[in-house]
Image (cartoon, rainbow, N blue to C red):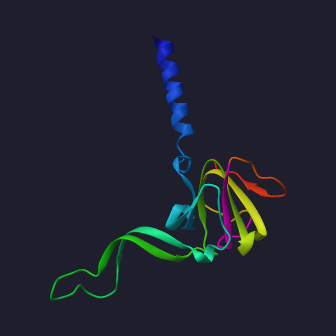
């Protein structure tokens, strides 16, 4: 009985540790405007390429209030809750999450030009390795095949 309990504890711990990354459950590569997965985000579907991040906006789900008081007559707040645009994604990526079996390639310039780095599956709270922070202008979320050629591969922090 003790052996069964030990084995059960070890298997449970291993499964929890293995599945602890939020990124593994994603259906897409996710890039964030700010470090530590904060600010707006943009999902890039698996096996999809975005040649110009300037054509896409970061999204944020929450409450945004405009300056000024509520409408004095109706008492209506100047706040909106829901999905909001947080501005263009070009040159603004600061953290990423990559699902299991995928790599996220960030390129310094549009059209997949300039320096490139590949982030492997996991949570990456900072993207200042491989290309500078806030310098990505195009991206690819590639699943199935590992990177080929002279590409810097960024491993998730332990």
Which residue is found at the position 52% from the left and 66% from the top?
41
- In the current view of this chain or complex, which residue is farthest to the front? 48
Which residue is found at the position 53% from the left and 51% from the top?
26
Relative height, residue 21 to residue 127 (above, below): above
- In the current view of this chain or complex, which residue is farthest to the top? 1
- Provide residue 10's location: percent of width, then percent of height: 53, 26
- In the current view of this chain or complex, which residue is farthest to the left? 73
What segment is highlighted magenta in the picture? Answer: 130-143
121 inside magenta stretch: no
Quadrant of the image occupied by residue 29: bottom right
Give the quarter of the figure containing the N terminus. top left
Front residue (pair 52, 75): 52
135 inside magenta stretch: yes
Which residue is found at the position 54% from the left and 66% from the top?
42
Quadrant of the image occupied by residue 89: bottom right
Judge whether residue 109 can be spotted in this image.
Answer: no
Front residue (pair 55, 76): 55
Q: In the image, 119: left or right of 113?
A: left
- Provide residue 127's location: percent of width, then percent of height: 65, 63
């Amino acid at each position: 009985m003790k052996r069964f309990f030990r084995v059960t504890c070890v298997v449970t711990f291993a499964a929890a540790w293995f599945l602890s990354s939020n990124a593994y459950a994603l259906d897409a590569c996710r890039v964030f405007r700010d470090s530590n997965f904060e600010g707006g985000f943009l999902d890039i579907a698996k096996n999809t390429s975005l040649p110009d991040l300037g054509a896409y906006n970061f999204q944020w789900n929450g409450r945004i209030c405009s300056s000024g008081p509520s409408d004095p007559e109706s008492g209506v707040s100047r706040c909106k809750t829901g999905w909001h645009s947080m501005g263009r994604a070009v040159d603004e990526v600061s953290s990423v999450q990559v699902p299991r079996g995928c790599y996220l390639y960030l390129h310094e310039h549009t059209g997949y030009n300039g320096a490139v780095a590949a982030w492997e599956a996991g949570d990456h709270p900072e993207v200042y390795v491989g290309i500078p922070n806030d310098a990505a202008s195009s991206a690819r979320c590639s699943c199935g095949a590992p990177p080929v050629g002279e590409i810097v591969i960024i491993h998730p922090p332990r």
